[in-house]
Image (cartoon, rainbow, N blue to C red):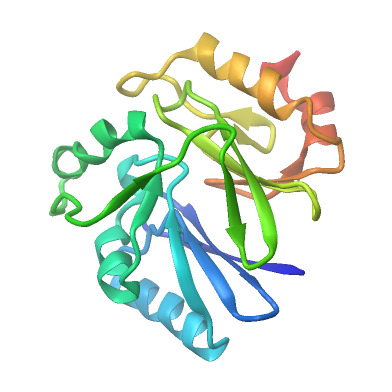
Amino acid sequence: MLHIQVFPFNPFSENTYVVYDNEKKAWLIDPGNFHAEETKALSQFIEQHQLKIEKILLTHAHIDHILGLQWAYDTFKTPIHLHPLEEEILKMGELSAQRFGFPFKNFVGEILYVEEGQKLYLGEEEFDIYFTPGHSPGSVCYHHKKQQFIISGDVLFQGSIGRTDLYKGNYNQLIESIQQKLLNLEEETTVLSGHGSATNIGVEKQINPFLK
C-alpha cells in the first residue's frame, strides 16, 4: 500500500508530494521547498518515517516546482526524472526567479527522461506516465491505477485548470490533454494537483467550468 504526504510550500503555495510504501521506499515529487523551515519540515518527515528517497520526479519544471530541486538532488543522491521537452523550462529557472525578484541558480545534476507509456515502480507498485502538455510543453502526470490516484501537476485543479499564458503554454492543447488522458480515468480517481486541494475525476466532470 502507498501513503501520500503533501507539503504546501513556497510563496506560490505549490504542493510537494512524498509518496512511500510500507517498506519505506519513497519518491519525492516536485520539491518546492524554498525557506529553511520548509526544508526542515520536509527533512524531518523523511527522517522520522525512515524513508529512502529512490526517485525525484517532476511533473513539470516551472520555478515553483523546482525551488528545492538542487537540495533534493544533493541530499538524496538520485537523478531527477522529467519529460525531455521540459528540460528547456528547467534551464529557465534562474531567469524565472529573477522576474519574481529572488535569487536562484539553475539545477546541476543528472537527469533521466520519462515518456508516456513508460512504467515506473515504487517498490512493487506500478505507475503509468501520461504526457499532458498545455500548461507546460513537457508536463506529465503519474497515475497509480491500483489505488486510483493521479499526481497531475498543474494540468487539472479543483474546479479549474492550469494557466496557459506562460512560455509555450497552449490552452487548446491543455484541454485536449485533460479530455484525452484524465477524463477517461475512473471517476473515483483522486487528482492530486500542484496547487490547492485534492479532487476527483467524477467531480471535475460535473463542476469544472473549463471542461463543459
Residue 3 to residue 179: above or below = below
Q: Which residue: 37% across, 80% down?
A: 40
Of residue 37 and residue 78, the one placed in the foreground of this image is 78
Vertically, is 144 above or below 45? above
Instruction: Decide which of 72, 14 is in the foreground and name it.
Output: 72
Query: Looking at the image, can residue 11 be seen?
Result: no
Percent across and percent down for residue 118 are 56, 39
The quadrant where residue 67 appears: bottom left
Instruction: Identify the image quadrant of residue 10.
Output: bottom left
Is 104 situated above or below 53? Answer: above
For the image, the number of numbered tags is 0
Please name the residue shown 43% across and 48% down the image.
58
Residue 2 placed where, x, y %? 71, 67
How far across and down, in percent of the image, does residue 132 sit? 54, 27
Residues 121 and 101: in front is 121
Q: Quadrant of the C terminus?
A: top right
Q: Is residue 27 visible?
A: yes
Residue depicted at 21% across the width and 57% down the height:
109
Judged left or right of residue 90, residue 25 is right
Give the quadrant of the N terminus.
bottom right
Which residue in the rendered view is the most extreme toward the top?
Answer: 172
Taking the image as shown, residue 127 lies to the left or right of residue 194, namely: right
